[in-house]
Amino acid sequence: MTATVPPAPSADGPITDPGGRVELPPGAVPEDSRFANADLLPVPVARRSWTTYNFAALWVGMAHNIPSWLLASGLVTLGMDWKQAVLTIALANVIVLLPMLLTGHAGPKYGIPFPVLARASFGVRGANLPALIRAAVACAWFGIQTWIGGQGIFVLLGKIFGGWAEASRIGGQPWTLWLCFLLFWVLELAIIHRGMDTLRRFENWAAPFVIVGALVLLVWITVKAGGLGPLLDQPSELGWGAEFWPVFFPSLMGMIAFWSTLSLNIPDFTRFGAGQRAQIRGQALGLPTTMTLFALLSVFVTSGSQAVYGAAVWDPVELAAKTDNVFGLVFALVTVLVATISVNIAANVVSPAYDLANLAPKIINFRTGALITGVVGVLIMPWKLTATPELYIFTWLGLVGGLLGTVAGILIADYWIVRRTVLDLAALYRPDGPYWYVRGWNPRAVLAFVVGGVLAVGGSHSAPGKGPFPEDGLIPFLKPLADYGWAVGLAASLAVYLLLTLPSGRGGAKMVTYR
């Protein structure tokens, strides 16, 4: 029987409810399986309860954070006016929503996280390749967000109490900054340690609070600027001609790359969904709308700062610190805390916790994976990645987007085109099933990943003194593709995977069979 046709029902086979949600019966996966633990097994249908509001609130909480703000304000700093910046971000989030919904489909249907879904295409062992790439990116993002959050607390508390910046230094930074960083790190891990239900409840109230905080900042800078006029009148330094497009396309890919991480591991959340309608409506309502709204707020405030202070202040914490009102500073401090925790534990801890658990299920569970993520996030130097808009948007996001787009192309090709959303659920946890391929690895997926990855990031380049890559690109003849890394990676890996897979039989019948 081919992989595009559901297996015949059996006494111990999967159970499908009227809504199309599949569940394994008790004992379908042996308790001593080295490829499973309680966190990687499918979520029981009874626990798939997240509604449209839960998914929309999740996205509102994740979208409204300081790095999201830096995306939009960074575009203004690069020379765009508010209309160009908002257009770039809105278009990027409409584009990235499509793979988000496609990969998210497996969550409500099968109740499985991203690394288990990746076993279908990469192999039971091979899934560790995309899982560890996603985990590494998430650990880096965790460090970036935690540093930004700790820095925000340091700046705002310094304004309230005074003298923090003059404290004795350790490792080139005031010890008070390290203290803020440490306290913020501990608070994040304490919340995630309590599990996904705590995360869902936190996101439900954090989302509206952060929106209010951003609106307060907008009102404040509007009053300082003398009305909305100065916010809207800041001209574009690029125009709409030859100078605009070389900035627009890499910026668009950077904006897409910002959420390309979640376009892979969104099953980590949708596996708790009550059904497809909940995840589709929730994500469609939550992602593009809130990111566009937040982009509007960000560019208006940044334009206002340009009018008030003579230069664009792209960091909202630095901008908020310019007020001498104690209540305003405390409110900004709480908003920074809530906003950063909201996105960091959802976007950058949940995924690597599952990914690392997939690496060694019998040794690492969800909580252990979260702790490892926290430690690795501390060991990087996140302040360097956000030092300039060029480094943040073009180098970091461009490189990440290219690699993650490559993985997304393979997942989408395998799940939607090769298998037509039909998986042998129990076989995802077995070493003797259809997803074992060659010693647990699918060579076709690995080759597609290598080809797509080289095309996507091989031309990575930096302006002199602006980044780590050669001016002519790592592979010079691929330099023209570098500005489109995410799209190139996704399209190339999808095409290569299908070319290698479909000729072996209708829907990959000879490559993957039920047993």
Image: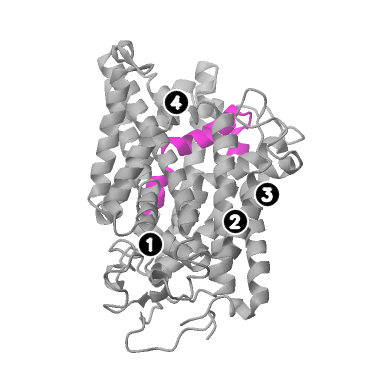
Give the percent coordinates (x, y) of residue 258. Answer: 51, 44
Element under disc 3: helix
Which mark identifies residue 52?
1
Could you tell which of marks 2 and 4 lies nearer the N-terminus?
A: 4
Q: Is residue 250 visible?
A: yes
Residue count near mark 1 (Cα–Cα under 10 Å), binned few <14, some 14–19, many ≥20: many
Compared to residue 3, the image places residue 34 above or below, namely above
- Whether 497 is among the magenta residues is no
What sort of colour scheme is used for the picture? one colour
Query: Which residue is labeled 4 in the image?
Result: 221
The span shown in magenta is: 57-85
**Badge 1 or badge 4: first in the primary sequence:** 1
Question: Please, what secondary structure does the residue beneath circle 4 have?
Answer: helix
Residue 46 horizontal/vertical position (percent): 27, 72
Look at label 4 and name its amino acid: Ile
Q: Which mark is residue 159?
A: none
In the rendered structure, which disc, 2 or 3, sits on the residue that comes first in sequence? 2
Quarter of the image where one finds residue 306: top right
Tell me, yes or no, if residue 88 can be seen here: no
Q: Measure the C-alpha gap from mark 2 to mark 4.
A: 47 Å
Q: Earlier in the sequence, mark 3 or mark 1?
A: 1
Rendered residue at 56%/68% (across/down):
414
Circle number at residue 449: 2
Which mark, residue 455?
3
Q: Nearer the viewer, residue 43 or 475?
A: 475
Q: What residue lies at 25% left-to-right and 53% top-to-bottom?
A: 195
